[in-house]
Amino acid sequence: MIKLFQSVNEMLDNAGIPLEIIDGFIGSISVSVPWTALLSDSCCLDIQGLELTIMPRQRVDTGLTNIFLFYSRLFKAWPNWPPQIFNTVDALVSDHLQKSGCN
């Protein structure tokens, strides 16, 4: 089951979904295969009693989270500010990216 969680967690991460499965339980699985009509009929997978423990994915913070949060709040709070202010903020973000090696 751990291998399954790792695969699902990789898919969630690749899709940009900041969640990870850390525990789970499956009560039962049943599969119905239409052997006489394999090419024309669907198979059915029935999962009963599925329980998952999901938590936010732990991300490494490069220090940019607070800058981008500030920047987005700034846009919402002061939508009519002159563009020079945002150019200054852009310069600060670029400087931080260069210093942290995230360019």
Image: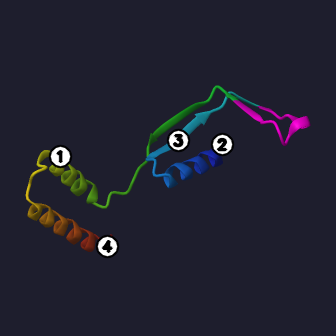
**Which mark is nearer the camera, 2 or 1?**
1
Mark 4–mark 1 distance (CA, rounded to whole Å): 29 Å
Mark 3–mark 1 distance (CA, rounded to whole Å): 36 Å
Q: Which residue is mark 1?
A: 76
Q: Specify how the rendered protein is coloured.
A: rainbow
Q: Horizontal and vertical percent for residue 57? A: 43, 47
Q: Earlier in the sequence, mark 2 or mark 1?
A: 2
Q: Earlier in the sequence, mark 4 or mark 1?
A: 1
**Which disc is residue 1 wearing?**
2
Query: What is the magenta range?
Result: 31-46
Give the secondary structure at mark 1: helix
Residue at 45 percent across and 52 percent down: it is: 16
Give the secondary structure at mark 3: strand
Mark 2–mark 1 distance (CA, rounded to whole Å): 44 Å
Above or below, 68 relative to 42 = below
Above or below, 12 relative to 84 = above
Residue at 85 percent across and 40 percent down: it is: 38
- In this view, the residue farthest toward the front is 40
Left or right, 88 with respect to 7, comes to left
Mark 4–mark 2 distance (CA, rounded to whole Å): 38 Å
Q: Earlier in the sequence, mark 4 or mark 2?
A: 2
